[in-house]
Image: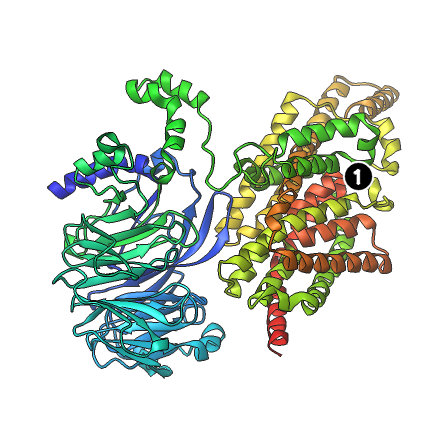
């Protein structure tokens, strides 16, 4: 009863403690679980792979299961969503199994190979370890046979242990080296490098005719001897391929350095007194620190430079600590979980009571309540021992945790959650955000809540320069300059907005990145494109799209050529991962930034200086490139007539423009929002979020046609009722018809979405100001000189090929520039350029052609990467 009461009390606090929370009921308990690669990035959530194990009762085979998880962005989930979960149901955030692998025996531990995130190594109750390529393993979801002959065939089997090795497992992030410990008291190492190519590329046998143990065998590279009892856990030193640590039932913590031999380099014989040590983790930020957890619930943090006594010692868990892990994003923060059902977060840099004002400080109050001042958060959502958890490497302060509830009459529970930022943000920031709600917190009055909502401002996001919109002042000034100054008439409002925003960001007056800027890219940009499409003319689509498609393919060839030449000239200066960076940039400049992420993930470009520098250089140079092509003159030609050129002037003089009313603006906004929402939802449901812009374009164009025809039909009914009021002679009928025709010619056209173009234009100005502000972060390019030179060479050759190819093939300059924009920036920036230049007939071709880049750029970028890799090796 006490457990139920404490769990109910915790559940009431979920909306206050968590930014996001989801609970997923598992059919079978899961002893091991791991985050997989990031699959899709969306405006409100990301889709990520998750690896789960299933520990069955013998009626079904034990399996490794691949699922997809939708991870909501921070400050997206509502309080009702947070409080309205049930532990006994499946979560809508977790997909059905994407693939299943039948495993020989229970899966006790899983670890991914950092160099190949789709490759897993598994531990079971045997001396063998199994290596699985999850991309190429056949799907065995429908197989229920428990026969050994029906097990999946492992891609690689690691041999060497002489007794069961159940839990101790770690993979180095520096090289594909696996470390394992077991009952034979030894720590064994395997070098997977010689098999990494085949694991990453070949098709697994995976058939049903042989057991998993029939796969390729690999003997241990090193055998480290020093423990006297079972090795319970092992971990590599981050960034090292030679240093590792292990703990065991002999109460010892051992540090190893394979460069010095196979004997321990350092021994802490009684790390937790006479207690078995179950877990160990090495800090990725301060490599002198390790944390260990023991059977009595104690935690100890060790400085390997002085191990006579621990640097910190905590005794908060009431039962054995089974898992410890450091935060990958925040120095000094780690977490621990164990058999007492708790998962705790610790901050070693938390101020002590003396540092926080003696007896009156916050840390002193925590100390008086017997809570260590370093414990910053406690997750109490499980009703059974926590058997595994992991920080999300792609999403700060986000976790999964799993509990074995078989003893409670259930299977298991997977919980996905993110700590509220009020837990870890500076106290003064949190108090400032809560200040408007002081009266509501005290009184609970609804009137006080409404007043607080009106006064409250969103918090300044961590890592951002500020929360102010980066585009609003600049875009407004840009439009004024265009309309009222001679220089503005030459520059145009988009270029003037970009220049002003760039100058403001360079001077530090505007942030180069902010929440508002992200919202403009994610939400307002598609909405603006949809508004323009509501007044598009589909009759000109084929003539415009054909030339734009040809120009786009020419631009793709230019990017490939530019990448090859630039890599030949400066590739060796980009470092050992230079070919991966070059391939990612190549894909980005064929189809947009979505492909940059896809190729960098496919080529296992690890987070670090190379990736960060490439992203910084890409953002700044891309903004300058868009500014450049927007500045180039484009002769109108025949294609401009569809955008309000000279061929439309006579028609315009005979037929006045449709009147813009509040009703038409509201209808335009609703139709654009509907197209964006349906396009995004349909693309997400189909598992291809990158097609959202293409579907939005089709839906908005369809609504434009439907709206025009409905309006014309209503007008015809209205005129018919007026003209057909009674019988008349043929002459009077002819006269009436003629007068009706004259009235129709002089009346505004049937345009239910009048004003949509102007609305889209206002939103587009915000977009171009945001691009200009991003280009103002030139100081961030320090240390990226060779990357900047590489991109400049790459884009210069791309532009030269576009212009030369367009001239040779006699393509309209408008199509050439829009296609180049679609290559480099993607469909959104191409559509923005078309609309801002007044080329409304080019908006839809820009969107559709740019979406084509999403489909082909990843494959081309990966192929170019393999070519550069071979050239670099040669």
Residue 145 position within the rendered picture, expressed as x and y whole percent measured from the top left: 28, 72
| Residue drawn at x 77%, y 20% as measured from the top left | 723
Q: Quadrant of residue 272?
A: bottom left
Nearest to the observer: residue 438 or residue 694:
438
Q: Dividing the image into 4 quarters, which one contains the N terminus?
A: top left
Q: Is residue 622 above or below residue 702?
A: below
The total number of labels drawn is 1
Q: Quadrant of residue 190?
A: bottom left
Residue 666 position within the rendered picture, expressed as x and y whole percent measured from the top left: 61, 26
The answer to whether one can see residue 673 in this image is: yes
Nearest to the observer: residue 10 or residue 255:
255
SS type, badge 1? helix
Residue 398 position within the rendered picture, expressed as x and y whole percent measured from the top left: 37, 48
Drawn side of residue 75 relative to residue 565, left or right = left
Q: Dividing the image into 4 quarters, which one contains the C terminus?
A: bottom right
| Residue drawn at x 29%, y 67% as measured from the top left | 245
Drawn side of residue 487 relative to residue 835, left or right = right
Crowd rating for badge 1 (residues with CA inside 10 Å; few <14, some 14–19, many 20+): many
Q: Dot 1 corresponds to which residue?
A: 643
Drawn side of residue 486 relative to residue 770, left or right = right
The answer to whether one can see residue 404 in this image is: no
């Amino acid at each position: 009863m006490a457990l139920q009461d404490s769990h109910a009390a915790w559940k009431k606090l979920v909306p206050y403690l968590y930014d996001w929370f989801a609970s997923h009921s598992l059919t079978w308990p899961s002893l091991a679980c791991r985050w997989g690669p990031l699959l899709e990035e969306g405006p409100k959530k990301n889709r990520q792979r998750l690896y789960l194990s299933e520990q069955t009762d013998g009626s079904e085979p034990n399996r490794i299961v691949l699922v997809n998880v939708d991870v909501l962005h921070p400050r997206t989930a509502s309080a009702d969503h947070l409080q309205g979960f049930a532990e006994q149901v499946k979560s809508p955030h977790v997909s059905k199994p994407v693939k299943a692998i039948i495993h020989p025996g229970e899966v006790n531990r899983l670890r991914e190979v950092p160099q190949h995130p789709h490759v897993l190594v598994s531990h079971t109750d045997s001396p063998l370890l199994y290596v699985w390529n999850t991309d190429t393993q056949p799907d065995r979801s429908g197989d229920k046979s428990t026969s050994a002959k029906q097990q999946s065939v492992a891609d690689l089997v690691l041999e060497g242990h002489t007794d069961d090795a159940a839990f101790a497992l770690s993979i180095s992030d520096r090289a594909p080296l696996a470390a394992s410990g077991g009952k034979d008291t030894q720590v064994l190492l395997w070098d997977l490098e010689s098999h990494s190519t085949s694991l990453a590329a070949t098709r697994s046998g995976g058939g049903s005719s042989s057991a998993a143990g029939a796969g390729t065998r690999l003997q241990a590279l090193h055998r480290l001897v020093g423990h006297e009892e079972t090795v319970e856990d092992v971990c590599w030193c981050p960034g090292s391929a030679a240093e590792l640590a292990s703990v065991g039932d002999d109460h010892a913590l051992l540090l190893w350095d394979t460069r010095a031999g196979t004997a321990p380099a350092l021994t802490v014989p009684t790390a937790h007194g006479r207690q078995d040590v179950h877990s160990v983790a090495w800090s990725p930020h301060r490599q002198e620190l390790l944390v260990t957890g023991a059977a009595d619930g104690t935690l100890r943090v060790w400085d390997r430079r002085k191990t006579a006594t621990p640097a910190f010692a905590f005794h908060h868990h009431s039962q054995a600590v089974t898992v410890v892990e450091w935060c990958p994003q925040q120095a000094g923060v780690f977490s621990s979980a164990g058999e007492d059902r708790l998962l705790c977060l610790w901050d070693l840099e938390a101020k002590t009571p003396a540092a926080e004002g003696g007896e009156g400080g916050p840390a002193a109050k925590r100390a008086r309540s017997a809570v260590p001042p370093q414990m910053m958060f406690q997750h109490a959502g499980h009703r059974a021992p926590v058997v595994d958890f992991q920080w999300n490497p792609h999403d700060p302060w986000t976790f999964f945790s799993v509990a074995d509830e078989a003893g409670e009459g259930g299977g298991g529970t997977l919980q996905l959650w993110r700590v509220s930022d009020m837990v870890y943000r500076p106290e003064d920031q949190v108090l400032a955000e809560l200040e408007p709600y002081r009266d509501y917190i005290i009184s609970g009055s609804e009137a006080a809540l409404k007043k607080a909502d009106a006064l409250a401002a969103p918090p300044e996001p961590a890592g951002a320069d500020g929360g102010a919109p980066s585009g609003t002042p600049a875009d407004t000034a840009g439009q004024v300059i265009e309309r009222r100054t001679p220089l503005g008439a030459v520059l145009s409002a988009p270029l003037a907005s970009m220049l002003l925003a760039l100058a403001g960001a360079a001077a530090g007056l505007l942030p180069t990145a902010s929440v508002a800027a992200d919202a403009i890219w994610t939400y307002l940009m598609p909405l603006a494109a949809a508004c323009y499409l509501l007044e598009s003319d589909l009759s000109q689509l084929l003539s415009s799209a054909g030339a734009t498609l040809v120009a786009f393919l020419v631009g793709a060839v230019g990017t490939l050529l530019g990448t090859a030449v630039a890599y030949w000239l400066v590739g060796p200066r980009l470092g050992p991962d230079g070919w991966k960076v070059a391939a990612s940039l190549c894909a980005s400049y064929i189809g947009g930034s979505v492909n940059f992420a896809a190729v960098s993930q496919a080529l296992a470009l690890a987070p670090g200086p190379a990736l960060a520098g490439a992203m910084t250089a890409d953002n700044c140079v891309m903004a300058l490139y868009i500014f450049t092509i927007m500045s180039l003159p484009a002769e109108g030609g025949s294609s401009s007539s569809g955008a309000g050129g000279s061929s439309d002037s006579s028609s315009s003089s005979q037929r006045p423009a449709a009147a813009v009313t509040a009703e038409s603006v509201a209808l335009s906004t609703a139709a654009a929002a509907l197209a964006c929402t349906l396009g995004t939802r349909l693309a997400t449901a189909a598992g291809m979020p990158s097609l959202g812009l293409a579907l939005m374009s089709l839906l908005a164009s369809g609504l434009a046609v439907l709206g025009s025809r409905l309006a014309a039909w209503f007008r015809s009914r209205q005129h018919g009722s007026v003209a057909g009021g009674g019988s008349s002679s043929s002459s009077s009928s002819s006269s009436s018809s003629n007068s009706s025709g004259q009235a129709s010619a002089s009346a505004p056209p049937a345009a239910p979405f009048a004003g949509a173009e102007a609305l889209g234009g206002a939103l587009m100005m915000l977009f171009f100001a945001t691009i200009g502000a991003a280009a103002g972060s030139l100081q961030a390019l320090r240390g990226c000189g060779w990357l900047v030179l590489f991109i400049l060479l790459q884009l210069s050759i791309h532009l030269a090929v576009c212009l030369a190819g367009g001239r040779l093939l006699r393509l309209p300059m408008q199509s050439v520039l829009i296609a180049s924009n679609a290559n480099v920036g993607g469909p959104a920036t191409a559509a923005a350029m078309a609309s801002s230049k007044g080329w409304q007939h080019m908006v839809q071709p820009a969107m559709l052609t740019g979406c084509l880049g999403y489909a082909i750029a990843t494959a081309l970028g990966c192929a170019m990467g393999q070519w550069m890799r071979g050239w670099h090796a040669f």
